[in-house]
Image (spheres, rainbow, N blue to C red):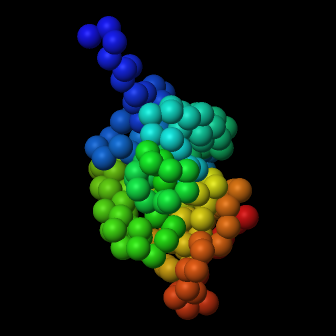
């Protein structure tokens, strides 16, 4: 039907591999020291179907190519954040949204990581979470609550995870880079 709306852009930019669950993957070049590093990149607020995530994904690909790491870029969830209105793809920064979405998200990331590691024949030596804007708030919240076994978190244009209690003992906290 010529009057039909165009299909929304694919979640993954063409230079990334689409994995199950709207998780994209880019295998960066191996660094000279042979250390295998994975970065899980959490996007900012996105209007569903806008395609703006491709710019963020491509930025991470450029960094991965230059610095020698691999990238997973998962998709947040529609309805996970009240900001921006209906159709906004976001990370669950509020307590109720975390209860609704978090376990599913973390399991999705773990499945994607295991799939990539199985293909490569070895686990990653280190995993970091990098968040932008809404993704930074969520990354900080994950770090403060000790939800992931990772080497560190980097947050850009975001805050401290709104009301996330410091549930992790001081000696068990991962580094947070702002």
Q: Count the marks.
A: 0
- Quadrant where the C terminus lies? bottom right
Apparent side of residue 49 relative to residue 32 in the rendered image (left or right): left
Q: Position of residue 142 (x, y in %)?
A: 51, 71
Report which quarter residue 12 is drawn in: top left
**Pick the front one: 116 or 49:** 49
**Residue 15, above or below 90:** above
Please name the residue shown 49% across and 71% down the image.
94
Q: Position of residue 131 (x, y in %)?
A: 59, 56
Please name the residue shown 45% across and 48% down the image.
86
Instruction: Please indicate, yes or no, whether residue 22 appears anywhere in the rendered image.
Output: yes
Instruction: Please indicate, yes or no, whether residue 110 appears anywhere in the rendered image.
Output: no
Please name the residue shown 69% across and 56% down the image.
156
**Residue 15, above or below 117:** above
**Residue 166, above or below 1:** below
**Pick the front one: 63 or 135:** 135
Residue furthest top as drawn:
2
């Amino acid at each position: 039907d010529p009057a039909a709306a165009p299909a929304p852009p694919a979640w993954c930019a063409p230079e990334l591999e689409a994995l199950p669950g709207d998780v994209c993957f880019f295998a960066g070049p191996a660094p000279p020291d042979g250390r295998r590093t994975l970065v899980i990149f959490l996007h900012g607020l996105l209007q569903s179907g806008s395609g703006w995530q491709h710019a963020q994904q491509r930025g991470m690909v450029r960094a991965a190519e230059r610095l020698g790491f691999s990238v997973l870029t998962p998709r947040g969830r529609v309805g996970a954040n009240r900001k921006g209105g209906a159709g906004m793809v976001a990370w669950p920064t509020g307590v109720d949204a975390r209860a609704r979405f978090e376990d599913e998200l973390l399991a999705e990331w773990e499945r994607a990581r295991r799939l990539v590691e199985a293909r490569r024949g070895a686990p990653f030596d280190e995993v970091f979470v990098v968040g932008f804007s809404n993704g930074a708030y969520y990354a900080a919240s994950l770090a403060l609550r000790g939800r992931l076994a990772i080497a560190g978190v980097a947050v850009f244009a975001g805050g401290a995870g709104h009301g996330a209690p410091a549930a992790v003992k001081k000696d068990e906290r991962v580094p947070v880079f702002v």
